[in-house]
Amino acid sequence: MIPLLFESYLLLLRLEFLMHFGDIRSIHTLVRQSQINNSARKARRGAENICRAIDIACVLYGHRVLCLQRSAAATLLLRRYGFRAELLIGAQVLPFKSHAWVEIDGCVVNDRPYMPEIYQVLERC
């Protein structure tokens, strides 16, 4: 779990750097261009363990991690370990709110399962 936690923390740092010195397009491009590693062993590192490592890294991070940063990191890490993860970005009109989460095969894996019912999906990558 320690190596996975370290990978998670480094991804959070990388994404924060992109958020501060780039723009949202740079994160979108990074996630969109990431490939699923088909040679990775899914059984060794389950999706739940990967999402748990991201959550723990967020707690240890030292300051607030935005949902886009957290979900992009989870998507990248899940793909690295062979999962067909998708980053979803959604919005709600009244009151206006936006949110990002990760799905595998249409099931939310890093948030509450009813996120697609609350937010209209604007982007899927």
Image (cartoon, rainbow, N blue to C red):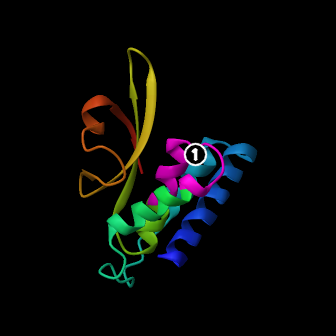
Question: Which residue is drawn at the image coordinates 51% and 62% (left, top)?
Answer: 33
- Tell me if residue 123 is in the magenta stretch: no
**Label 1: which residue?**
65
Q: Quadrant of residue 113?
A: top left
Q: Quadrant of residue 37?
A: bottom left
Residue 87, percent from left and from top: 41, 51
* Relative horizontal placement of residue 107, taking residue 84 as reference (left or right): left
Looking at the rendered structure, the secondary structure element under dot 1 is loop
Determine whether 49 is above or below 75 in the image.
below
Residue 80, percent from left and from top: 46, 73
* Dominant secondary structure (helix, strand or loop) of the stretch shown in magenta: helix
Determine whether 75 is above or below 46 in the image.
above
Is 121 or 71 nearer to us in this picture?
A: 71
- Tell me if residue 70 is in the magenta stretch: yes
Residue 97, percent from left and from top: 45, 25
Question: Which residue is drawn at the image coordinates 29% and 81% (left, top)?
Answer: 43
Residue 103, percent from left and from top: 32, 53
Disc 1 residue crowd, few under 14, some 14–19, many 20+, Cα 10 Å: some
